[in-house]
Amino acid sequence: MGMMPTLFDLPDSVPTVTLHGKYVGPDGRPLRGWVEILAPTPLTFPDAKAFVTGPVVIPLDAEGVFAVTLPATDVEGQNPTEWAYWITERLQGMADRKPYAIKLPQALTDPWLDQLAPTDPGTPDYVPVEGNRIYTGETAPPIGLGRHGDFYVMREPVDFLGQTDTRLTFWTNVDGTWVQQTGMVAAGRIYVNDTGTPSADAKPGDILIRSDNGDLYYRTSSGWGAPVANLTGPQGPQGDTGPQGPPGADSTVPGPEGPQGETGPQGDPGDSAYEVAVANGFTGTEAEWLASLVGPEGPQGPKGDPGAGSVNSVNGDLGPDIVLDAADVGAVDLSAVGEASGVASLGSDGKVPTEQLPELADPNAVTSVNGKPGPTVTLTAEDVDALPLSGGTLTGAVNGPAFNSSSTSQLENIRLGTGGSFAGGSGGIMSLSNAVNLPTVSPANSAVMFANGGAVNIRQSNGVQFPVSPPAGTWMPEDYGLAAWAYDLHANSRTPGDSPAEAQRLYLVGVPLRYAKSVSQVAFHVMGYNKPSTSVTNFRFGIYDASFTLLAQSNGDQKAQLPEVHNIGGQMAKLNLQSAVTLQPGHYYVAILMKGTITNAPYFAATNFGSTATTSGAVAAATSGVQRWLASSSTGYTSLPASGSLSAASFQESQTCYWAAIV
């Protein structure tokens, strides 16, 4: 193999990728020469405290091979943020090929240059192969599409604040997994808005102008932030008076009414009415003219309105003389006051005199009880909101002193069973006496709570029976942020553990869950793992029910979730499932599927690991049929099956009893 140079003595904080290459002629002979690799000048990385600059020249060894460790091209916080290496091949006896660019994301594992470089069919030293493909779509690339080296472009039409554009996002297929290479690509847009600074569809580089106050915002990766400027400048000085403009056109709109003018001089006296009549042909004296103005007497008209203060009628009786009695005004005649069938009068104390009241047999006599009329009234417990002496249902809150239905029931302090005590307490104490006969069958659609040996126990409808509180000094899964585990890790595991990286064998670890839980993670305890030199190529995990039906699983190969571990005692690793699943109380299997070799593979905690492997055959299956540990006979699994058979032909008790947990 070739030498493995680096750009310089790279700081530990810089992630790296080791690139390999090999050049041979058509007859298999190794080629001679070197490869030049050039990065942008200069490069900087977070916490590195150094510039990375200059080309790297790697000579080919006697076998035409080279290897070089370089900084990864997708390091968070690097400057520049988007860049690639330029490759120039200098091979003896051959014309130099045109330089080309490659990227080395951290997800690549020991890539070879022929997998990344473009192939030129016109060059005799290269065999024509299928080139990389470019896929397009309006959603993220689906799992399983394409192969290593392919590209995917997602088009996203966006209509925001009157601006319509198409934004592009790019992915590269790395070892079968789509890796996003850039953020969303879009030209910077300028938006005008007067109701705040929306950011749901805006992208870094966009500009927003507030039309209501002139504030100008610049969109960064963290949002709009505070205004960077204001387009409204200070008020300028008053300008000089401009020249007078030409007269405007006559207005077609009437102007406002002007003020009243002065009183004019008195005019000459006019003709009298008689003179006007004479001028118009009347003959006779003025007295005769006045007499001519009086016409003949007309018929009598209707009676007119008497006007304010006058009354024409009262209660329908017409005037002029109206006489009303008590009946006319709805009143009682004075002769009826104090008489039978009349009305009572009031005494000086404002009360009806005793002599005007009717006589009663007994003024304190009871005529009804709880709405039931006399003379004979029969009441039930329900009529007085009471509980019958036998039967009946008690509902609502019970207040007052203790209610006893028998010698073994008490509501202020409830006692169930004979014997027992309130241990010196009172007011809201419930006492359970030890059960005389312990429950032996599973209750249907319910759970049974009872005392045994002074401790509270619960028996569920699924047959599971357990104490409410664990014994003192007992560690439970909840103490470690877990819902359930295969066993107490500290009390039952040895070091250094064991590795499940055995030719794609499927391991099942039984885990009892005591209560319903929404689960999105499972956990393993990694005793040790040299991750940079890993031999693992496929790692999957999931959850099965007792019938071996898959309920949840990892999102394909998830070896990237495994942590690198070198410390004494190892490290618990909580790994994400593809989606959450709600589990009811019962027994489940946590599945482990790993492809790799024992060398440089993760070691998981196991309860019986030692120099000689032993089986868990002494541990019987649970009442649900779930075994504590199982291992598949087949070593050809590449993914978790949706369901299957747990027969002896397919699975046997595992020789290695791994620890697993449901989070």
Image (cartoon, rainbow, N blue to C red):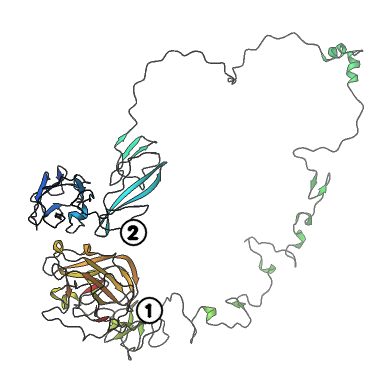
Quarter residue 190 falls in: top left
Q: Position of residue 43 (x, y in %)?
A: 15, 45
Q: Which residue is mark 1?
A: 412
Q: Which tag, 1 or 2, sits closer to the chain's start?
A: 2
Q: Position of residue 220 (x, y in %)?
A: 28, 44
Amino acid marked by disc 2: Pro
Please indicate, yes or no, whether residue 50 appears anywhere in the rendered image: no
Which residue sits at x=20%, y=57%?
Answer: 108
**Secondary structure beneath label 1:** loop
Quarter residue 438 falls in: bottom left
Depth check, mark 1 against mark 2: the one in front is 2
Which residue sits at x=11%, y=66%?
Answer: 567
User: From this viewpoint, which residue is outermost toward the front?
Assistant: 27
Give me the C-alpha separation between circle 1 and circle 2: 64 Å
Amino acid marked by disc 1: Glu
Which residue sits at x=18%, y=75%?
Answer: 489
Q: Which residue is mark 2?
A: 142
Q: Position of residue 642 (x, y in %)?
A: 33, 72
Between 128 and 227, the one nearer to me in the picture: 128
Give left or right: position of 29 versus 649: left
Question: Relative to residue 528, is residue 472 depicted above or below?
Answer: below
Between 251 and 606, the one nearer to me in the picture: 606
Give left or right: position of 169 versus 351: left
Question: Relative to residue 326, is residue 279 depicted above or below?
Answer: above
Name the image quarter holding the C terminus.
bottom left
Q: Position of residue 312 (x, y in %)?
A: 80, 43
Answer yes or no: do the residues labelled 1 and 2 have beta carbons within 8 Å? no
Between 17 and 324, the one nearer to me in the picture: 17
**Secondary structure beneath label 2:** loop
> Label 1: how many residues lie within 10 Å, few (<14), some (14-19) or many (20+)?
some
Please indicate, yes or no, whether residue 553 appears anywhere in the rendered image: yes
Between 425 and 135, the one nearer to me in the picture: 135
